[in-house]
Image: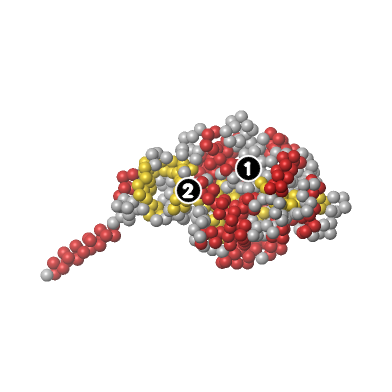
Protein backbone atom coordinates (compact mmCIF):
# COMPACT_ATOMS: atom_id res chain seq x y z
CA UNK A 1 0.00 0.00 0.00
CA UNK A 2 2.78 2.34 0.97
CA UNK A 3 4.68 1.57 -2.25
CA UNK A 4 1.52 2.29 -4.28
CA UNK A 5 1.17 5.66 -2.62
CA UNK A 6 4.78 6.47 -3.45
CA UNK A 7 4.22 5.58 -7.13
CA UNK A 8 1.07 7.69 -7.17
CA UNK A 9 2.97 10.63 -5.67
CA UNK A 10 5.76 10.32 -8.23
CA UNK A 11 3.19 10.16 -11.04
CA UNK A 12 1.34 13.23 -9.82
CA UNK A 13 4.61 15.11 -9.31
CA UNK A 14 5.71 14.28 -12.84
CA UNK A 15 2.43 15.64 -14.20
CA UNK A 16 2.87 18.85 -12.20
CA UNK A 17 6.48 19.15 -13.31
CA UNK A 18 5.54 18.70 -16.96
CA UNK A 19 2.80 21.28 -16.57
CA UNK A 20 5.32 23.76 -15.14
CA UNK A 21 7.73 23.09 -17.97
CA UNK A 22 5.10 23.53 -20.65
CA UNK A 23 6.03 26.44 -22.91
CA UNK A 24 3.78 29.46 -23.24
CA UNK A 25 2.01 29.91 -26.56
CA UNK A 26 2.98 32.95 -28.61
CA UNK A 27 0.48 35.29 -30.24
CA UNK A 28 2.99 36.12 -33.00
CA UNK A 29 6.15 34.55 -34.38
CA UNK A 30 8.34 36.36 -36.90
CA UNK A 31 10.89 34.14 -38.62
CA UNK A 32 13.34 34.15 -41.50
CA UNK A 33 14.40 37.62 -40.39
CA UNK A 34 17.79 39.20 -39.78
CA UNK A 35 17.44 40.38 -36.17
CA UNK A 36 19.95 42.73 -34.59
CA UNK A 37 19.04 42.41 -30.93
CA UNK A 38 21.47 44.94 -29.35
CA UNK A 39 21.95 42.25 -26.69
CA UNK A 40 25.71 41.63 -26.33
CA UNK A 41 25.02 38.07 -25.15
CA UNK A 42 23.21 37.29 -28.42
CA UNK A 43 23.64 40.09 -31.00
CA UNK A 44 21.93 38.29 -33.87
CA UNK A 45 18.91 36.01 -34.25
CA UNK A 46 16.57 34.70 -36.94
CA UNK A 47 13.20 34.51 -35.17
CA UNK A 48 11.23 36.12 -32.36
CA UNK A 49 8.14 34.93 -30.46
CA UNK A 50 5.79 37.43 -28.80
CA UNK A 51 2.89 36.99 -26.39
CA UNK A 52 0.66 39.99 -25.77
CA UNK A 53 3.17 42.81 -25.17
CA UNK A 54 6.24 40.76 -24.17
CA UNK A 55 9.00 38.83 -25.89
CA UNK A 56 8.87 35.09 -25.14
CA UNK A 57 11.90 34.06 -27.14
CA UNK A 58 14.59 35.37 -29.50
CA UNK A 59 16.88 33.01 -31.37
CA UNK A 60 16.60 30.24 -33.95
CA UNK A 61 13.52 29.56 -36.07
CA UNK A 62 13.38 25.98 -34.88
CA UNK A 63 13.29 26.94 -31.20
CA UNK A 64 10.83 29.79 -31.82
CA UNK A 65 8.36 27.36 -33.38
CA UNK A 66 8.16 25.51 -30.07
CA UNK A 67 6.00 28.44 -28.95
CA UNK A 68 3.53 27.98 -31.81
CA UNK A 69 -0.11 27.23 -31.05
CA UNK A 70 -3.26 26.82 -33.12
CA UNK A 71 -3.93 30.56 -33.07
CA UNK A 72 -0.35 31.81 -33.37
CA UNK A 73 0.21 34.26 -36.24
CA UNK A 74 3.27 33.25 -38.29
CA UNK A 75 5.07 35.84 -40.42
CA UNK A 76 7.90 35.06 -42.82
CA UNK A 77 9.91 38.29 -43.18
CA UNK A 78 11.96 36.97 -46.08
CA UNK A 79 15.28 38.12 -44.64
CA UNK A 80 14.18 41.65 -43.70
CA UNK A 81 16.13 43.47 -40.97
CA UNK A 82 14.60 43.73 -37.50
CA UNK A 83 15.89 45.73 -34.53
CA UNK A 84 14.59 47.44 -31.37
CA UNK A 85 12.42 50.52 -31.93
CA UNK A 86 14.24 53.84 -32.10
CA UNK A 87 14.23 55.88 -28.89
CA UNK A 88 14.48 59.66 -29.35
CA UNK A 89 16.48 60.89 -26.37
CA UNK A 90 15.98 64.62 -27.02
CA UNK A 91 13.19 66.09 -29.13
CA UNK A 92 10.46 68.72 -28.76
CA UNK A 93 7.12 67.33 -29.99
CA UNK A 94 5.27 69.89 -27.85
CA UNK A 95 7.03 72.75 -29.63
CA UNK A 96 6.47 70.98 -32.95
CA UNK A 97 2.72 71.04 -32.35
CA UNK A 98 2.94 74.81 -31.93
CA UNK A 99 4.61 74.97 -35.34
CA UNK A 100 1.71 73.05 -36.81
CA UNK A 101 -0.59 75.86 -35.70
CA UNK A 102 1.50 78.53 -37.41
CA UNK A 103 3.77 79.27 -40.35
CA UNK A 104 6.76 76.92 -40.76
CA UNK A 105 9.97 78.74 -41.64
CA UNK A 106 12.42 75.83 -41.35
CA UNK A 107 14.78 75.85 -44.32
CA UNK A 108 14.03 79.45 -45.36
CA UNK A 109 17.19 80.71 -47.07
CA UNK A 110 16.60 84.46 -47.27
CA UNK A 111 14.71 87.32 -45.67
CA UNK A 112 12.80 87.81 -48.92
CA UNK A 113 11.64 84.18 -48.86
CA UNK A 114 10.56 84.53 -45.22
CA UNK A 115 8.57 87.68 -45.98
CA UNK A 116 6.88 85.95 -48.89
CA UNK A 117 5.86 82.94 -46.75
CA UNK A 118 4.60 85.20 -43.98
CA UNK A 119 2.53 87.33 -46.36
CA UNK A 120 0.97 84.21 -47.88
CA UNK A 121 0.21 82.73 -44.45
CA UNK A 122 -1.46 85.92 -43.20
CA UNK A 123 -3.55 86.07 -46.38
CA UNK A 124 -4.68 82.44 -45.98
CA UNK A 125 -5.43 82.78 -42.24
CA UNK A 126 -7.38 86.05 -41.80
CA UNK A 127 -9.07 84.86 -38.60
CA UNK A 128 -5.86 84.10 -36.70
CA UNK A 129 -5.69 86.38 -33.65
CA UNK A 130 -1.95 85.82 -33.30
CA UNK A 131 0.49 85.03 -36.10
CA UNK A 132 2.93 82.43 -34.86
CA UNK A 133 5.88 80.91 -36.72
CA UNK A 134 9.01 78.87 -36.19
CA UNK A 135 12.26 78.14 -37.98
CA UNK A 136 14.07 81.29 -39.09
CA UNK A 137 17.85 81.43 -38.85
CA UNK A 138 20.12 84.39 -38.11
CA UNK A 139 22.11 83.89 -41.29
CA UNK A 140 19.22 85.23 -43.42
CA UNK A 141 19.89 88.72 -42.00
CA UNK A 142 23.38 88.80 -43.53
CA UNK A 143 25.13 90.23 -40.47
CA UNK A 144 22.19 92.40 -39.37
CA UNK A 145 19.59 91.58 -36.72
CA UNK A 146 15.84 90.87 -36.61
CA UNK A 147 13.88 94.12 -36.39
CA UNK A 148 10.19 94.65 -35.61
CA UNK A 149 9.89 97.24 -38.40
CA UNK A 150 10.27 94.46 -40.99
CA UNK A 151 7.32 92.57 -39.50
CA UNK A 152 5.28 95.74 -38.99
CA UNK A 153 5.23 96.30 -42.75
CA UNK A 154 3.52 92.93 -43.16
CA UNK A 155 1.31 92.80 -40.04
CA UNK A 156 0.59 95.80 -37.81
CA UNK A 157 -2.90 95.05 -36.47
CA UNK A 158 -2.22 91.75 -34.62
CA UNK A 159 0.72 90.28 -32.73
CA UNK A 160 3.41 88.31 -34.53
CA UNK A 161 5.85 85.96 -32.78
CA UNK A 162 8.40 84.02 -34.83
CA UNK A 163 10.70 81.68 -32.89
CA UNK A 164 14.15 80.92 -34.32
CA UNK A 165 15.16 77.50 -35.61
CA UNK A 166 17.29 76.80 -32.50
CA UNK A 167 14.38 77.88 -30.23
CA UNK A 168 16.72 80.22 -28.36
CA UNK A 169 15.37 83.54 -29.59
CA UNK A 170 12.21 85.11 -31.00
CA UNK A 171 11.30 87.95 -33.33
CA UNK A 172 8.18 89.98 -32.60
CA UNK A 173 6.36 92.93 -34.17
CA UNK A 174 5.31 96.17 -32.45
CA UNK A 175 1.78 94.93 -31.79
CA UNK A 176 3.11 91.95 -29.84
CA UNK A 177 5.28 94.17 -27.65
CA UNK A 178 2.33 96.51 -27.13
CA UNK A 179 -0.05 93.74 -26.04
CA UNK A 180 2.60 92.19 -23.80
CA UNK A 181 3.41 95.60 -22.34
CA UNK A 182 7.11 95.20 -23.08
CA UNK A 183 8.82 98.57 -23.58
CA UNK A 184 11.93 100.56 -22.65
CA UNK A 185 10.92 100.44 -18.99
CA UNK A 186 10.70 96.63 -18.97
CA UNK A 187 13.63 94.98 -17.24
CA UNK A 188 15.47 92.17 -18.98
CA UNK A 189 14.68 88.77 -17.36
CA UNK A 190 18.41 88.25 -16.87
CA UNK A 191 20.72 90.97 -18.26
CA UNK A 192 23.21 89.72 -20.87
CA UNK A 193 21.74 86.22 -20.69
CA UNK A 194 17.99 86.46 -21.38
CA UNK A 195 17.38 89.96 -22.72
CA UNK A 196 15.66 92.21 -25.27
CA UNK A 197 17.82 93.79 -27.95
CA UNK A 198 17.34 97.55 -27.70
CA UNK A 199 17.96 100.71 -29.73
CA UNK A 200 19.91 103.68 -28.39
CA UNK A 201 16.81 104.90 -26.57
CA UNK A 202 16.28 101.59 -24.79
CA UNK A 203 13.28 100.50 -26.85
CA UNK A 204 13.08 96.79 -27.80
CA UNK A 205 14.08 96.39 -31.45
CA UNK A 206 12.13 93.17 -31.96
CA UNK A 207 14.77 90.54 -31.20
CA UNK A 208 14.18 88.61 -27.97
CA UNK A 209 17.35 86.75 -27.02
CA UNK A 210 16.99 83.47 -25.06
CA UNK A 211 13.89 81.74 -23.79
CA UNK A 212 12.78 83.72 -20.75
CA UNK A 213 12.05 86.71 -22.97
CA UNK A 214 9.42 84.91 -25.05
CA UNK A 215 8.32 81.49 -23.70
CA UNK A 216 6.28 83.08 -20.87
CA UNK A 217 4.42 85.07 -23.55
CA UNK A 218 2.82 82.04 -25.25
CA UNK A 219 -0.28 81.76 -23.10
CA UNK A 220 -0.68 85.54 -22.98
CA UNK A 221 -0.88 85.49 -26.78
CA UNK A 222 -3.40 82.64 -26.75
CA UNK A 223 -0.94 79.98 -27.91
CA UNK A 224 -0.54 76.40 -26.67
CA UNK A 225 -3.99 75.55 -25.30
CA UNK A 226 -4.83 71.97 -24.29
CA UNK A 227 -7.25 71.72 -27.22
CA UNK A 228 -4.53 72.88 -29.64
CA UNK A 229 -2.07 70.32 -28.26
CA UNK A 230 -4.55 67.46 -28.46
CA UNK A 231 -5.48 68.31 -32.04
CA UNK A 232 -1.89 68.66 -33.28
CA UNK A 233 -0.46 65.72 -31.27
CA UNK A 234 -3.07 63.47 -32.89
CA UNK A 235 -1.61 64.38 -36.28
CA UNK A 236 2.08 64.46 -35.31
CA UNK A 237 2.61 61.38 -33.13
CA UNK A 238 1.60 58.79 -35.77
CA UNK A 239 4.39 60.22 -37.94
CA UNK A 240 6.90 59.09 -35.31
CA UNK A 241 5.54 55.56 -35.71
CA UNK A 242 6.24 55.79 -39.46
CA UNK A 243 9.80 56.79 -38.55
CA UNK A 244 10.20 53.76 -36.28
CA UNK A 245 10.22 55.75 -33.03
CA UNK A 246 8.65 53.81 -30.15
CA UNK A 247 9.72 56.03 -27.25
CA UNK A 248 10.90 59.60 -26.76
CA UNK A 249 11.84 62.25 -24.26
CA UNK A 250 10.26 65.66 -24.76
CA UNK A 251 13.00 68.13 -23.87
CA UNK A 252 10.46 70.77 -22.97
CA UNK A 253 7.67 73.06 -24.04
CA UNK A 254 8.07 75.94 -21.56
CA UNK A 255 5.25 77.89 -19.96
CA UNK A 256 2.41 75.79 -21.40
CA UNK A 257 3.80 72.36 -20.47
CA UNK A 258 0.82 71.32 -18.34
CA UNK A 259 -1.53 71.88 -21.27
CA UNK A 260 0.65 69.51 -23.29
CA UNK A 261 0.67 66.89 -20.51
CA UNK A 262 -3.12 67.02 -20.19
CA UNK A 263 -3.47 66.44 -23.93
CA UNK A 264 -1.12 63.44 -23.84
CA UNK A 265 -2.96 61.80 -20.94
CA UNK A 266 -6.25 62.28 -22.78
CA UNK A 267 -4.84 60.77 -25.99
CA UNK A 268 -3.71 57.70 -24.07
CA UNK A 269 -7.16 57.31 -22.54
CA UNK A 270 -8.52 57.27 -26.09
CA UNK A 271 -5.87 54.72 -27.17
CA UNK A 272 -4.28 57.30 -29.48
CA UNK A 273 -0.80 57.53 -27.92
CA UNK A 274 1.37 55.27 -30.13
CA UNK A 275 4.64 55.51 -28.19
CA UNK A 276 6.20 55.80 -24.75
CA UNK A 277 6.46 59.46 -23.81
CA UNK A 278 8.70 60.99 -21.14
CA UNK A 279 8.15 64.58 -20.04
CA UNK A 280 10.52 67.13 -18.55
CA UNK A 281 9.96 70.12 -16.30
CA UNK A 282 11.55 73.07 -18.08
CA UNK A 283 13.21 75.61 -15.76
CA UNK A 284 13.71 78.87 -17.62
CA UNK A 285 14.80 81.28 -14.88
CA UNK A 286 16.19 81.68 -11.37
CA UNK A 287 12.75 82.15 -9.86
CA UNK A 288 11.54 78.81 -11.26
CA UNK A 289 14.74 77.14 -10.06
CA UNK A 290 13.84 77.85 -6.42
CA UNK A 291 10.79 75.60 -6.62
CA UNK A 292 12.04 73.17 -9.31
CA UNK A 293 12.16 70.15 -6.98
CA UNK A 294 8.66 70.72 -5.59
CA UNK A 295 7.26 71.53 -9.04
CA UNK A 296 8.74 68.36 -10.53
CA UNK A 297 7.34 66.24 -7.72
CA UNK A 298 3.92 67.82 -8.21
CA UNK A 299 3.96 67.18 -11.96
CA UNK A 300 5.19 63.61 -11.43
CA UNK A 301 2.24 62.83 -9.19
CA UNK A 302 -0.38 64.60 -11.30
CA UNK A 303 0.63 63.38 -14.75
CA UNK A 304 1.39 59.68 -14.75
CA UNK A 305 0.02 56.81 -16.81
CA UNK A 306 1.26 53.62 -18.42
CA UNK A 307 2.84 55.37 -21.41
CA UNK A 308 3.45 58.88 -20.04
CA UNK A 309 5.37 60.07 -17.01
CA UNK A 310 7.86 62.73 -15.95
CA UNK A 311 11.56 61.99 -16.35
CA UNK A 312 13.76 64.96 -15.47
CA UNK A 313 14.21 68.62 -14.68
CA UNK A 314 15.43 70.41 -17.82
CA UNK A 315 18.06 73.13 -17.28
CA UNK A 316 18.94 75.28 -20.35
CA UNK A 317 22.18 76.63 -18.90
CA UNK A 318 23.48 78.48 -21.93
CA UNK A 319 22.40 79.47 -25.43
CA UNK A 320 23.92 78.90 -28.86
CA UNK A 321 27.18 79.68 -30.58
CA UNK A 322 25.29 81.25 -33.49
CA UNK A 323 23.70 83.87 -31.21
CA UNK A 324 26.92 84.15 -29.19
CA UNK A 325 25.05 83.15 -26.03
CA UNK A 326 26.84 79.83 -25.45
CA UNK A 327 29.21 80.15 -22.48
CA UNK A 328 32.85 79.76 -23.54
CA UNK A 329 36.13 79.56 -21.64
CA UNK A 330 37.65 82.13 -24.00
CA UNK A 331 35.95 85.06 -25.71
CA UNK A 332 34.22 84.91 -29.08
CA UNK A 333 36.68 85.52 -31.90
CA UNK A 334 34.75 88.46 -33.35
CA UNK A 335 33.55 89.81 -29.99
CA UNK A 336 36.49 90.19 -27.54
CA UNK A 337 34.29 91.43 -24.69
CA UNK A 338 31.94 88.44 -24.84
CA UNK A 339 32.41 84.92 -23.49
CA UNK A 340 28.71 84.20 -23.32
CA UNK A 341 26.83 83.68 -20.07
CA UNK A 342 25.35 80.81 -18.09
CA UNK A 343 21.84 80.93 -16.68
CA UNK A 344 23.03 79.56 -13.33
CA UNK A 345 26.53 80.17 -11.96
CA UNK A 346 28.67 77.38 -10.55
CA UNK A 347 27.40 77.67 -6.98
CA UNK A 348 23.72 77.85 -7.96
CA UNK A 349 24.04 74.98 -10.42
CA UNK A 350 25.71 72.83 -7.75
CA UNK A 351 22.87 73.63 -5.36
CA UNK A 352 20.22 72.65 -7.94
CA UNK A 353 21.97 69.38 -8.79
CA UNK A 354 22.50 68.54 -5.12
CA UNK A 355 18.83 69.10 -4.39
CA UNK A 356 17.83 66.89 -7.30
CA UNK A 357 20.26 64.16 -6.29
CA UNK A 358 19.05 64.25 -2.69
CA UNK A 359 15.52 63.62 -3.98
CA UNK A 360 16.46 60.98 -6.61
CA UNK A 361 15.44 63.30 -9.46
CA UNK A 362 17.10 63.23 -12.87
CA UNK A 363 18.64 66.30 -14.48
CA UNK A 364 18.77 67.03 -18.23
CA UNK A 365 21.01 70.01 -18.92
CA UNK A 366 21.44 71.93 -22.17
CA UNK A 367 25.15 72.64 -22.61
CA UNK A 368 26.72 73.99 -25.81
CA UNK A 369 29.86 75.90 -24.79
CA UNK A 370 32.98 74.44 -23.20
CA UNK A 371 32.56 76.53 -20.04
CA UNK A 372 28.96 75.41 -19.60
CA UNK A 373 30.00 71.77 -20.00
CA UNK A 374 32.90 72.15 -17.57
CA UNK A 375 30.81 73.83 -14.89
CA UNK A 376 28.00 71.29 -15.37
CA UNK A 377 30.40 68.41 -14.79
CA UNK A 378 31.79 70.21 -11.74
CA UNK A 379 28.28 70.65 -10.34
CA UNK A 380 27.42 67.02 -10.79
CA UNK A 381 30.71 65.88 -9.26
CA UNK A 382 30.08 68.06 -6.20
CA UNK A 383 26.48 66.78 -5.89
CA UNK A 384 27.68 63.19 -6.21
CA UNK A 385 30.29 63.71 -3.49
CA UNK A 386 27.68 65.25 -1.20
CA UNK A 387 25.09 62.53 -1.85
CA UNK A 388 27.03 59.41 -2.92
CA UNK A 389 23.96 57.20 -2.60
CA UNK A 390 21.24 58.31 -4.99
CA UNK A 391 19.12 56.98 -7.84
CA UNK A 392 19.45 60.26 -9.75
CA UNK A 393 20.73 60.19 -13.34
CA UNK A 394 22.32 63.15 -15.06
CA UNK A 395 22.30 63.88 -18.79
CA UNK A 396 24.13 66.68 -20.54
CA UNK A 397 22.62 67.35 -23.96
CA UNK A 398 24.22 68.65 -27.18
CA UNK A 399 27.78 68.96 -25.71
CA UNK A 400 28.80 70.78 -28.87
CA UNK A 401 32.17 72.12 -27.78
CA UNK A 402 33.89 69.87 -25.22
CA UNK A 403 37.33 70.80 -23.91
CA UNK A 404 39.66 67.79 -24.13
CA UNK A 405 40.26 67.39 -20.34
CA UNK A 406 36.49 67.13 -19.83
CA UNK A 407 35.94 64.27 -22.29
CA UNK A 408 36.88 61.41 -19.90
CA UNK A 409 34.85 62.96 -17.07
CA UNK A 410 31.54 61.87 -18.63
CA UNK A 411 32.46 58.22 -18.11
CA UNK A 412 34.21 58.81 -14.79
CA UNK A 413 31.18 60.59 -13.32
CA UNK A 414 28.52 58.48 -14.99
CA UNK A 415 27.12 61.45 -16.93
CA UNK A 416 25.10 60.56 -20.03
CA UNK A 417 26.21 62.48 -23.13
CA UNK A 418 23.22 63.21 -25.36
CA UNK A 419 24.21 64.22 -28.91
CA UNK A 420 22.52 65.04 -32.22
CA UNK A 421 24.64 63.89 -35.20
CA UNK A 422 21.99 65.24 -37.58
CA UNK A 423 22.96 68.81 -36.63
CA UNK A 424 25.47 68.81 -39.48
CA UNK A 425 22.62 68.30 -41.97
CA UNK A 426 22.66 71.81 -43.41
CA UNK A 427 26.19 72.90 -42.58
CA UNK A 428 27.41 74.20 -45.95
CA UNK A 429 30.47 76.35 -46.55
CA UNK A 430 28.60 79.54 -45.60
CA UNK A 431 27.56 78.14 -42.24
CA UNK A 432 30.98 76.64 -41.57
CA UNK A 433 32.68 79.95 -42.38
CA UNK A 434 30.26 81.69 -40.02
CA UNK A 435 31.41 79.39 -37.21
CA UNK A 436 35.04 80.12 -38.04
CA UNK A 437 34.31 83.84 -37.84
CA UNK A 438 32.52 83.54 -34.51
CA UNK A 439 34.75 81.08 -32.57
CA UNK A 440 37.82 80.59 -34.80
CA UNK A 441 38.92 77.58 -36.82
CA UNK A 442 40.49 75.61 -33.95
CA UNK A 443 37.29 75.58 -31.89
CA UNK A 444 35.10 75.12 -34.96
CA UNK A 445 37.00 71.96 -35.86
CA UNK A 446 36.69 70.55 -32.33
CA UNK A 447 32.89 70.54 -32.27
CA UNK A 448 30.72 67.42 -32.01
CA UNK A 449 33.28 64.93 -30.62
CA UNK A 450 30.69 62.16 -30.76
CA UNK A 451 32.94 59.18 -31.45
CA UNK A 452 35.43 60.28 -28.78
CA UNK A 453 32.62 60.24 -26.23
CA UNK A 454 31.72 56.67 -27.21
CA UNK A 455 35.38 55.70 -27.18
CA UNK A 456 35.82 57.16 -23.68
CA UNK A 457 33.31 54.63 -22.34
CA UNK A 458 30.57 57.17 -21.70
CA UNK A 459 26.92 56.31 -22.20
CA UNK A 460 26.05 58.25 -25.36
CA UNK A 461 22.43 58.63 -26.42
CA UNK A 462 21.14 60.02 -29.73
CA UNK A 463 18.28 62.38 -30.51
CA UNK A 464 17.44 64.95 -33.14
CA UNK A 465 16.36 68.02 -31.11
CA UNK A 466 13.60 68.57 -33.71
CA UNK A 467 12.27 71.16 -34.45
CA UNK A 468 15.33 73.00 -33.11
CA UNK A 469 17.41 70.78 -35.41
CA UNK A 470 17.22 73.19 -38.35
CA UNK A 471 15.80 70.54 -40.65
CA UNK A 472 12.41 68.99 -41.35
CA UNK A 473 10.97 66.17 -39.25
CA UNK A 474 11.84 63.51 -41.83
CA UNK A 475 15.34 64.93 -42.27
CA UNK A 476 15.74 64.75 -38.48
CA UNK A 477 14.66 61.11 -38.33
CA UNK A 478 16.84 58.28 -36.95
CA UNK A 479 17.15 56.85 -40.49
CA UNK A 480 18.74 60.08 -41.76
CA UNK A 481 20.94 60.19 -38.67
CA UNK A 482 22.15 56.66 -39.47
CA UNK A 483 23.74 58.14 -42.58
CA UNK A 484 24.79 61.55 -41.27
CA UNK A 485 26.37 60.04 -38.17
CA UNK A 486 28.62 57.91 -40.39
CA UNK A 487 29.56 60.62 -42.90
CA UNK A 488 29.27 63.97 -41.06
CA UNK A 489 27.96 65.25 -44.39
CA UNK A 490 24.65 66.17 -45.94
CA UNK A 491 22.69 63.06 -47.04
CA UNK A 492 23.63 61.59 -50.40
CA UNK A 493 26.26 64.28 -50.98
CA UNK A 494 29.67 62.60 -50.89
CA UNK A 495 31.32 65.80 -52.16
CA UNK A 496 29.81 68.09 -49.52
CA UNK A 497 31.86 69.45 -46.62
CA UNK A 498 32.82 66.88 -43.98
CA UNK A 499 32.38 68.53 -40.60
CA UNK A 500 35.71 68.15 -38.78
CA UNK A 501 36.98 66.14 -37.19
CA UNK A 502 36.63 63.24 -39.62
CA UNK A 503 37.71 60.84 -36.88
CA UNK A 504 34.48 61.68 -35.05
CA UNK A 505 32.36 59.77 -37.58
CA UNK A 506 30.27 57.11 -35.86
CA UNK A 507 30.01 53.43 -36.68
CA UNK A 508 26.60 51.93 -37.41
CA UNK A 509 26.91 49.90 -34.22
CA UNK A 510 27.44 53.10 -32.19
CA UNK A 511 24.52 54.86 -33.88
CA UNK A 512 22.10 52.00 -33.22
CA UNK A 513 23.32 51.65 -29.64
CA UNK A 514 22.82 55.38 -29.10
CA UNK A 515 19.27 55.18 -30.47
CA UNK A 516 18.30 52.05 -28.54
CA UNK A 517 19.78 50.67 -25.31
CA UNK A 518 21.72 53.85 -24.37
CA UNK A 519 18.68 56.04 -24.98
CA UNK A 520 16.60 53.53 -23.03
CA UNK A 521 19.00 53.95 -20.10
CA UNK A 522 18.62 57.73 -20.23
CA UNK A 523 14.83 57.34 -20.24
CA UNK A 524 14.95 54.77 -17.39
CA UNK A 525 13.54 52.12 -19.69
CA UNK A 526 16.59 49.84 -20.09
CA UNK A 527 14.91 46.99 -18.17
CA UNK A 528 11.86 47.16 -20.44
CA UNK A 529 13.02 48.12 -23.96
CA UNK A 530 16.12 49.10 -25.95
CA UNK A 531 17.11 45.54 -26.88
CA UNK A 532 15.24 42.46 -28.06
CA UNK A 533 15.52 40.00 -25.17
CA UNK A 534 13.26 37.47 -23.50
CA UNK A 535 11.00 39.16 -20.99
CA UNK A 536 11.32 42.66 -22.42
CA UNK A 537 8.42 44.59 -23.94
CA UNK A 538 7.85 44.09 -27.66
CA UNK A 539 8.99 47.44 -29.09
CA UNK A 540 10.57 46.68 -32.45
CA UNK A 541 10.82 47.77 -36.08
CA UNK A 542 11.38 46.08 -39.43
CA UNK A 543 13.47 47.90 -42.06
CA UNK A 544 13.56 47.55 -45.83
CA UNK A 545 17.34 46.98 -45.82
CA UNK A 546 20.16 46.03 -43.48
CA UNK A 547 21.87 49.32 -42.51
CA UNK A 548 25.13 47.48 -41.80
CA UNK A 549 25.24 46.30 -45.43
CA UNK A 550 23.85 49.45 -47.14
CA UNK A 551 26.22 51.83 -48.93
CA UNK A 552 26.65 54.73 -46.51
CA UNK A 553 25.30 57.44 -48.85
CA UNK A 554 22.17 55.35 -49.49
CA UNK A 555 21.21 54.70 -45.87
CA UNK A 556 18.70 57.57 -45.74
CA UNK A 557 16.65 55.74 -48.39
CA UNK A 558 15.96 52.83 -46.00
CA UNK A 559 12.28 52.64 -45.11
CA UNK A 560 10.51 51.52 -41.97
CA UNK A 561 8.15 48.69 -42.98
CA UNK A 562 6.65 47.92 -39.59
CA UNK A 563 6.64 49.47 -36.14
CA UNK A 564 5.47 47.55 -33.07
CA UNK A 565 5.06 49.26 -29.70
CA UNK A 566 4.01 47.32 -26.61
CA UNK A 567 3.14 44.32 -28.75
CA UNK A 568 0.80 46.35 -30.99
CA UNK A 569 1.48 47.14 -34.63
CA UNK A 570 1.22 50.93 -34.71
CA UNK A 571 2.50 51.30 -38.28
CA UNK A 572 2.73 49.00 -41.27
CA UNK A 573 3.77 50.05 -44.76
The part of the image, by quadrant, that contains residue 249 is bottom right
Front-lying residue, 340 or 50: 50
At horizontal 33% and vertical 48% (from top left) the residue drawn is 64
Q: Which residue is mark 1?
A: 471
As drawn, which residue projects farthest toward the top? Answer: 495
Say the numbered circle drawn on residue 571. 2
Q: Are marks 2 and 1 in contact (CB under 8 Å)?
A: no
Q: Quadrant of the N terminus?
A: bottom left
Please identify, in this view, whether the residue under mark 2 or under mark 1 is nearer the observer.
2
Question: Total label count?
Answer: 2
Task: Label 2: state its secondary structure.
Answer: strand
Seen in the picture, residue 317 relative to 118 is either above or below; the reply is below
At horizontal 53% and vertical 59% (from top left) the residue drawn is 267
As drawn, which residue projects farthest toward the bottom? Answer: 1
- Label 2 neighbourhood size at 10 Å, few (<14), some (14-19), many (20+)? many
- From mark 2 to mark 1, how far is it between C-alphas? 24 Å
At horizontal 59% and vertical 54% (from top left) the residue drawn is 232
Question: Residue 43: horizontal and vertical position, in percent?
Answer: 42, 44
Tell me if residue 211 can be seen.
Answer: no
At horizontal 35% and vertical 47% (from top left) the residue drawn is 74
Tell me if residue 221 can be seen.
Answer: yes
Front-lying residue, 168 or 287: 168
Front-lying residue, 416 or 378: 416
Amino acid sequence: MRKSLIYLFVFLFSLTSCSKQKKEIADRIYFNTNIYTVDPEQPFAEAIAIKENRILYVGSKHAAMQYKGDKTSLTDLNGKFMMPGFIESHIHPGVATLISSGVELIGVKSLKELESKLIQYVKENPNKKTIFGFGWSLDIFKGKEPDKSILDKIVNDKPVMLISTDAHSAWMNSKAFELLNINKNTKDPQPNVHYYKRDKYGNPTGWCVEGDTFWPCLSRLGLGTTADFEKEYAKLLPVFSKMGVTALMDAGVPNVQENAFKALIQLEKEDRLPLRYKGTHYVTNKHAAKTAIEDFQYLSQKYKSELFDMLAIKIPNDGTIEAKTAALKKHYSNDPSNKGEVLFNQATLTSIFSGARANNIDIHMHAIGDRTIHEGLNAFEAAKNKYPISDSRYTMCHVQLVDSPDLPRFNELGVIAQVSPNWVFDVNDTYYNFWVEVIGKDRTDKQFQNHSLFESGACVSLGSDFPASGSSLWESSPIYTMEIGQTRQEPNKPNSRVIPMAKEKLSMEEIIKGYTINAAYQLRLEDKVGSLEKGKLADLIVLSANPFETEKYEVHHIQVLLTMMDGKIVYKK
